[in-house]
Amino acid sequence: MRALKVLLSIVVIFGVLFVIGDRVAVSYAESMAADKIRSSQGLEKSPEVSIKGFPFLTQVAGRSLTEVDADLGGMSASADGRTLRVEKLSAQFHDVALGSDYTSVQSAASATGSARISYADLTKAAGGDVKISYAGEKNGRSQVKISPNVPVLNSLEVTGSITVSGNTVRLRADEIPAMCRALPACQSTVRSQTDHVWKLDQLPGNLKLDKVVTRPDGISLTASGHDVRLPG
């Protein structure tokens, strides 16, 4: 009986040491992955990376990680000299394949991502004292209220739609009011303030935008991809 207790104690000790070693290894791997993502994506600071699944060491031995989550903070996209700031960008990569050196990643079987754009940042990106605010959805389209700055017209307001495709976010006025269409150059002035296209070239793993939803507190973007190639 005493020998059995000693054996069990040894097993418990080795189990504890394995868990500690496993957690140390995953912490180191998360830090190294964060540095690689920062350098490859041109980020100002390293993102927060979390490697899911236990034990980590057996996943490494099989050169396949169950899930890797990355909180990339924010990013920016420029168009016509105006910058659109995207905040709270995060991504989840599933079934991540490791390289033959066990330290580099090659691809993920699938991935999803999400991001948020505030109305304040969208307003700033539109420029020209244009104001953009929440308008809900209509006929399946995410809409916003756009107040262009047209000196000859007071309190002009139009409804605009936000759409996404690939790595592109588009904002466009649905219709120009009749009183503006009747004035020379008014329509082109309004369109220059309401219609914009921004390309998000820093989406991780070449994810593609697939949905946009307008909410009272901002614009929600989602992205996805399959057989995603990963840097580093």
Image (cartoon, rainbow, N blue to C red):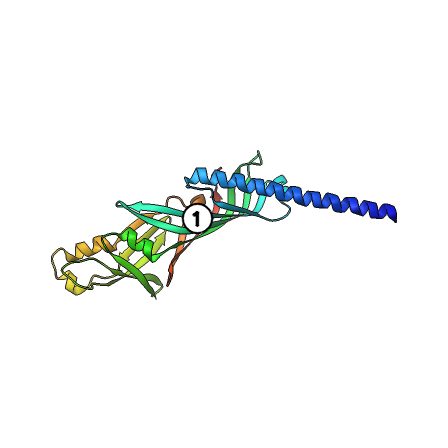
Task: Tell me which corner region of the image, top left, top right, bottom left or bottom right, holds residue 211.
Answer: bottom left
Read off the residue under disc 1: 73
Q: Position of residue 94 (x, y in %)?
A: 53, 48
Question: Nearest the camera: 139 or 212?
Answer: 212
Task: Tell me which corner region of the image, top left, top right, bottom left or bottom right, holds residue 157.
Answer: bottom left
- Up-down relation of residue 152 to residue 8 (above or below): below
Answer yes or no: is residue 155 visible: yes
Single out the residue that lies furthest toward the left.
Answer: 184
Q: In this rendering, would 60 be left or right of 79?
A: right
Q: Position of residue 232 (x, y in %)?
A: 49, 37
Q: In this rendering, would 141 be left or right of 71?
A: left
Q: Residue, x 63% and y 42% (percent of image)? A: 57
Answer yes or no: is residue 58 visible: no
Question: Nearest the camera: 173 or 17?
Answer: 17
| Amino acid type for the residue under numbered disc 1 | Gly
Question: Nearest the camera: 199 or 70?
Answer: 70
Q: Residue, x 36% and y 46% (percent of image)? A: 76
Q: Residue, x 40% and y 51% (percent of image)? A: 87
Name the secondary structure under disc 1.
strand
Q: Position of residue 98 (x, y in %)?
A: 56, 39
Task: Tell me which corner region of the image, top left, top right, bottom left or bottom right, holds residue 201.
Answer: top left
- Up-down relation of residue 135 to residue 87 (above or below): below
Q: In this rendering, would 214 be left or right of 72?
A: left
Q: Position of residue 210 (x, y in %)?
A: 40, 54
- Up-down relation of residue 183 to residue 98 (above or below): below
Question: Nearest the camera: 208 or 158?
Answer: 158
Q: In this rendering, would 44 be left or right of 135?
A: right
